[in-house]
Amino acid sequence: MNITTKPSLDTAFKKEVFQGLTNSPKYLSSKYIYDATGDKLFQDIMALPEYYLTNCEFEILDLHKEAIAKLFATTTGTFDLIELGAGDGKKTKVLLRHFSEKKINFVYKPIDISQNAIDQLSEKLSEELPQITVDAEKGEYFEVLDRLKTYRSRKKVILVLGSNIGNLLHPRAIDFLSNLKDSMGDDDLLFMGFDQKKDPQIILNAYNDPTGVTAAFNKNLLTRINRELGGNFDVSKFKHWERYDPETGTAKSFLVATEAQKVTISELNLDLTFDPWETIHTEISQKYDDNVVEWLASESGLVIETSFSDSKGYYKDYVFRKK
């Protein structure tokens, strides 16, 4: 590794890429996979037969939408539905349509790190569900938490679908849940998806599809660095690799250099060398059971109100209140 001159790390993207690629072992944050290309690739992943999470959560929301509506709505039926990591909103629309049909008065506040995702979701909702009030925001989870604390005028329901909590190891997940708890009032709810432990092969297949969509999704990190930071990664010289540890419930994604190579990132004034089979850790996907979720909640000052499962028991959406 060689740093020619001290770079100007004037954006979060520059700062985190620099920190990750100058670390040993190297790593990159999965949140930066999500640009217009990454958003499309993730939609393709969700449509894969191996990626069971999407269909499981669709089943939960459709099967239990009436019970969920009763939980969310107050006596006046008025609340803010604040979704973190809204993405394309396909699953959320199951609830939005039901709430609209029941004439429940609420404001939908989708929040996502990708401006492209926010723009597309807002446009689609204006066409498909024009009667719903939508107040969208671009932002990272931890940036948004401070703003959530100011939402005190009426009941808040914070929605985190897709097991996004699984991108955080337990200590950071507890910090995240604790911050969410601090933004909640006594009547507020947190509705969050947790992928459950199951046959390890099913989990591996979900993150290592034979068609290569998941590999292209992870490699989009390198493509984005090339485009936005003047990198010259040869993406074809990196292999996507997935690992799952059933003891800890942690699935990890890596990009592995298939040969020795040198990479320059001009915007970071950074020259990198990769040894054969050297790794870049790109993503974790944590899996859970009831005991782990109950422990995370307790450590974070939350209690489980109830939970909803799909018919196979592969996935659960938990509802939390402040302790």
Image (spheres, rainbow, N blue to C red):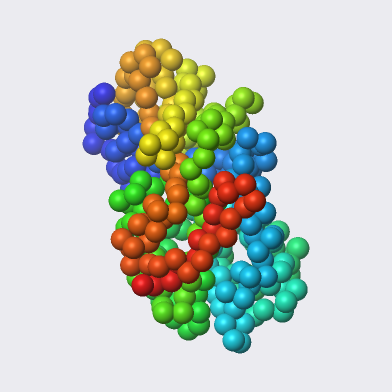
Locate residue 283, reporting x and y percent. Answer: 43, 38
Would residue 28 be visible to someone looking at this image?
Answer: no
Q: Residue at x 52, y 44 (%)?
A: 34
User: Which quadrant of the figure has residue 286?
Assistant: top left
Does 208 appear above or below 113? Answer: above
Locate residue 110, reporting x and y percent. Answer: 56, 63
Q: Residue at x 32, y 19 (%)?
A: 273
User: Which quadrant of the figure has residue 263?
Assistant: top left
Locate residue 19, reporting x and y percent. Answer: 29, 38
User: Which quadrant of the figure has residue 210?
Assistant: top right
- State which quarter of the image contains the N terminus: top left
Would residue 240 be visible to someone looking at this image?
Answer: yes
Asked whether, in this view, residue 177 is left or right of residue 201, the answer is left
Q: 106 or 34: which is nearer to us?
A: 106
Q: 104 or 203: which is nearer to us?
A: 203
Q: How many marks?
A: 0
Q: Residue at x 36, y 72 (%)?
A: 323
Q: Residue at x 46, y 21 (%)?
A: 238
Asked whether, in this view, residue 175 is left or right of residue 258, the answer is left
Q: 222 or 178: which is nearer to us?
A: 178
Locate residue 215, reporting x and y percent. Answer: 54, 28
Residue at the bottom extreme? Answer: 76
Does 130 appear above or below 113? Answer: below
